[in-house]
Image (cartoon, rainbow, N blue to C red):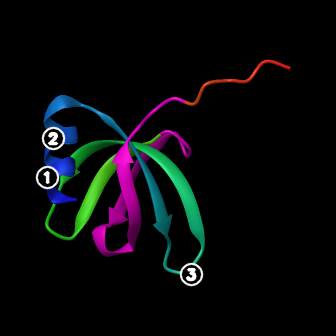
Amino acid sequence: MENLLIKASEEKIKLEMIYMDSQGELSYRVIRTVKNEEEHILGYCYTKKKVRSFRKDSILSIYPYKPRERKEA
């Protein structure tokens, strides 16, 4: 995970993640890393539309963002 965070920060790559907050609630987030610290990520959250802090030990899954294709009706 650390290598992905470093690369995303350097190359300004969007990431998708599954995150568990302090109350145990799961959420799907799309973020852009602003600062990679030892225990936290500071990132712009496209869901909340502001910079947020995320605990690394609460990230359940993280990977490069891939836009979903829309299916035509």
Are discs 2 and 1 less than 8 Å apart at CB?
A: yes
Q: At numbered mark 3, what does the secondary structure look like: helix, strand or loop? A: loop
Kind of residue at disc 1: Asn
Q: Which mark is residue 54?
A: none
Residue occupying image coordinates x 55% and y 54%: 28
Are discs 2 and 3 less than 8 Å apart at CB?
A: no
Q: Looking at the image, tell me whether mark 2 or mark 3 is earlier in sequence order.
A: 2
Magenta span contains residue 10: no
- The quadrant of the picture occupied by the N terminus is bottom left
Q: Nearer the viewer, residue 16 or 73?
A: 73
Res. 26 image quadrant: bottom right
Q: At numbered mark 2, what does the secondary structure look like: helix, strand or loop? A: helix
- What is the C-alpha distance between the residues marked 1 and 3? 28 Å
In the image, taking residue 62 as reference, residue 20 lies left or right, namely right
**Circle 3 residues within 10 Å: few <14, some 14–19, many ≥20:** few
Percent across and percent down for residue 69 are 61, 25
In the image, taking residue 28 as reference, residue 38 lies left or right, namely left
Q: Label 1 belongs to which residue?
A: 3
What is the magenta range? 46-67
Q: Label 3 belongs to which residue?
A: 23
